[in-house]
Amino acid sequence: MRLGSGAFAASCVAIEVIGFAIFIRGFFPAPVRSSARPEHGVETPAPEPVAGASSNWTKLPSPLFSKVVIVLIDALRDDFVFGSKGVKYMPYTTYLVEKGASHSFVAEAKPPTVTMPRIKALMTGSLPGFVDVIRNLNSPVLLEDNVIRQAKAAGKRMIFYGDETWLKLFPKHFVEYDGTTSFFVSDYVEEREILSPSLLVLCGDHGMSETGSHGASSTEEVSTPLILISSAFERKPGDIRHPKHVQQTDLAATLAIGLGLPIPKDSVGSLLFPVIEGKPMREQLRFLHLNTLQLSKLLQENVPSYEKDPGFEQFKMAERLHGNWVKLHLEENHSDILLGLGTKVLRQYLGALKTLSLALSTQVAHYDIYSMAVGTVMVLEVLTLFLLSTPHVLCRKAELDVPLMSPVFSLLFYLIFLVLSAIHVLVCTSSESSCYLCSLPWLAVGGVMVLVSALLCAIVSALIRMVIDGTLLKKSAAYPSSGWSEVDVLLLLGTVGHVLSLGASSFVEEEHQTWYFLVNTLCLTLSQETCRSYFVGDDCEPQHRFRVEQGCVDILACTLKDSTSYNTPKPDRTRKGVSLSEGQGSCKWWTVLASPWLVLVCCRLLRSLNQTGVQGAHRPDLSHWLTSSDHKVQLSGLAALSLAVIFMLVQNGCSLVSKAALALGLLGVFCYRAATGIVLFPWQPDNKGISKGIIEARFVYVFVLGILFTGTKDLLKAQVIATDFKAKTVGLWEIHSGLVLLAALLLRPHNLPVLAFSLLIQTIMTTFIWKPLRHGAAEITVMHYWFGQAFFYFQGNSNNIATIDISAGFVGLDTYMEVPATFLTVFGTYVGPVLWASHLVHFLSSEESNGSALSRACFCYALICSVPVAAYIVLVTSLRYHLFIWSVFSPKLLYEGMHLLITAALCAVFTATDQTRHTRA
């Protein structure tokens, strides 16, 4: 089957997305869960253990507290309460901690440190999955067993005031509520004296880094205060102790015990013992038994070999000793033997609680190896097929024969399919395995196996064809040496070097430094190339400017060296080259020589705008200076200047109608930011009447949609009218302009210079580098990819989830809508790669004489994105027990997955645009 290289690349990336999704599902395991469904009524507690007698205590002891008030402060860090800041800003709380009737702890929050997963951990006692960070944008109803549900089932009356996330997690649970984004409490008074004391819980859902962000796993982000205040606790005058470190999941079990409720079934936390240490020994042992019994049941349902677990053995020993103690207690034996045995049982229970809780918490590191292996095989097969197809795409034609029919009807295909089916049955029937693929319908699993088998057969067919053609055995006589230019070598080594750097956690955390170095080195290399082209002359002209289509030296050379050039007819083979003076057209020689240095200066300025990464995120930068309230005038001026520059750089290729829409849209962007109070109007310096800016933002959306519609109409017109090449060029530029306008709306005002510099560099590179030097499609594609990645970090992003600007998903929305909010957030995060890819489509499509350029560029773009993805999933598989697997490597894995999904969408756009050219041809 003959396919264009663009369509082939788009199909391969789509398969790669499926494989990556399967790998992700296996890599992020399902959290520890109980198979028992939550009951509608109050559950009957387990009886007290006895030895040879029946206990008269089959019910829970009386609740410790009659009412509980939980004060949860968003992003409250532990040193805000226990440190010097607490003494200064929270003096009364500090007094209660040091001398009042309270117990203080430092509760550790597991990553991701965002609101919704942490609320789930506090109320269920379970460890939410890492992928819950994505669902944080839209909090679904919490179906797991939790303290709030148990309290409602017990007839407790609950009132809520605060963040509406709670109302989404627990709908119809509160008899009175008011969900807001922020609230203020001016004062409170104590309740009337009742039989049982009340409990006040002061805690945070997560902490924050020094820069005010959160989401990752730094000490500042995971350390939160947990203070329990009640008249039931003994006062400790003058007793200043360092707070004990506990887990955030311990609160759910403590609240359940304190209110006389069953502990949530999925809880992996242990009771905070200081809360009950003032109670009689029998009640203490009863509470500890209920907690360890619940954890042991959860262990039995999630660990096949639970009987050999040290925590389970400790629990059984403690239960036996507890039964003996109850027997002595019922015999009214009050001797020292009873006290000593009770103390021993107490220690045994506490040890079992600690061991069981740790064993269940570490269950999150149990991976679905089968799903990971299947996903990895699919991704590696796609990458292998890409590499084997490279010579045919870049060195010969922009089309290739994909061996689809022969593998499907070959004996090898059926043999592979049968072997995979047998492996699947063997894995799924194993008693000690719980795999995602095993839970899927056979039809879905069969489709995955068909893909794996067909890809393997296609790889074998491609290898056989290459051996028959002699591609792997000999070199073309036309190229006795590789003839690589410095740019070719840099692009290859830089790409490979970046992939290798992903194996180190420090390089992942500071990946922006890698891309900054690569684009700066690229600018220096281009400067050397322009100088050589101008001063040396034709005799030493780089070979990539007058290539002939006679094949390439090898696969790696084909990746960067193709036969497509720009603004140049097919050269006469008797000539040695084309000088820079001939290729630069109307460009002055000094502008060409100075352009790489100008790009280098722009990149250096952008590095000073946003500090990112881990090592330098706390350092002062221009964005912090601009966003401070003292420099609002400077921010307003810079935003206005950036919008003006954006208009000047974009409007040149648009139609008259689109120019007007662009101008009004950019004006609306400034009005939107002024309405929200971030920037100032010249005639309204005090920013009176600050609003959400919903009307202004929707005003801009209208122009964005209008420009995109105009560009799409011109593209369709180019498909119908074969000779209307200009309509296609204008249409692509208008689509690019619409995306630029949308980016200007979503980016914060201090990041508008990033967008302006991006467009400026695109203009400089197009006018003074790519056209005069006539680089090939593969080289230009790799350069666009590099700059897109660099601008991803220039706008302040990193491989830390905390740097995602979620506010972009709420621009122009008065209520949360999942689909628009997700799209806007993703686009606002990946503005750099998307805009550079859209510019690449327009640039390659604007050259009428090179029909295969866009198809080859699509192939190169897909290939250069597939290499780091394939390498990274192999790396994280091998490093899955690394110390930083959840804090460093896992967030990067999510970024790679989203980037791959965006690449698939971009390849579809590449292919659709290329079909316009084929239709016209």
Image (cartoon, helix red, strand yellow):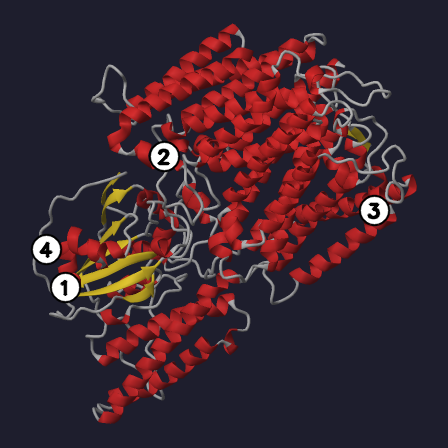
Q: Quadrant of the N terminus?
A: top right
Q: Which residue is mark 2?
A: 622
* Whole-number angstrom distance, CA of label 1 to CA of label 2: 53 Å
Q: Nearer the viewer, mark 1 or mark 3?
A: 3
Can you see residue 693? no
Q: Quadrant of the C terminus?
A: top right
Residues at discs 1 and 2 in contact (Cβ within 8 Å) = no
Q: Earlier in the sequence, mark 1 or mark 4?
A: 4
Q: Position of residue 515 (x, y in %)?
A: 55, 40
Mark linked to residue 191: 4
Can you see residue 141? yes
Q: Is residue 865 left or right of residue 169?
A: right
Q: Which residue is mark 3?
A: 460
Q: Quadrant of residue 503?
A: bottom right
Q: Is residue 27 left or right of residue 468?
A: left
Q: Which residue is mark 1?
A: 197
Q: Earlier in the sequence, mark 4 or mark 3?
A: 4
- Secondary structure beneath dot 2 equals helix
Q: Nearer the viewer, mark 1 or mark 2?
A: 2
Q: Earlier in the sequence, mark 2 or mark 4?
A: 4
Above or below residue 918? Residue 457 is below
Q: Position of residue 326 (x, y in %)?
A: 29, 85
Residue type at mark 2 is Leu
* Whole-number angstrom distance, CA of label 1 to CA of label 3: 75 Å
Q: Nearer the viewer, mark 2 or mark 4?
A: 2
The residue positioned farthest toward the front in the image shown: 535
Q: Position of residue 81 (x, y in %)?
A: 22, 56
Binning the other alpha carbons within 10 Å of mark 1 as few (below 14), some (14 to 19) or many (20 upward) gives some
Q: Nearer the viewer, mark 2 or mark 3?
A: 2
Q: Quadrant of residue 317?
A: bottom left
Q: Earlier in the sequence, mark 1 or mark 2?
A: 1
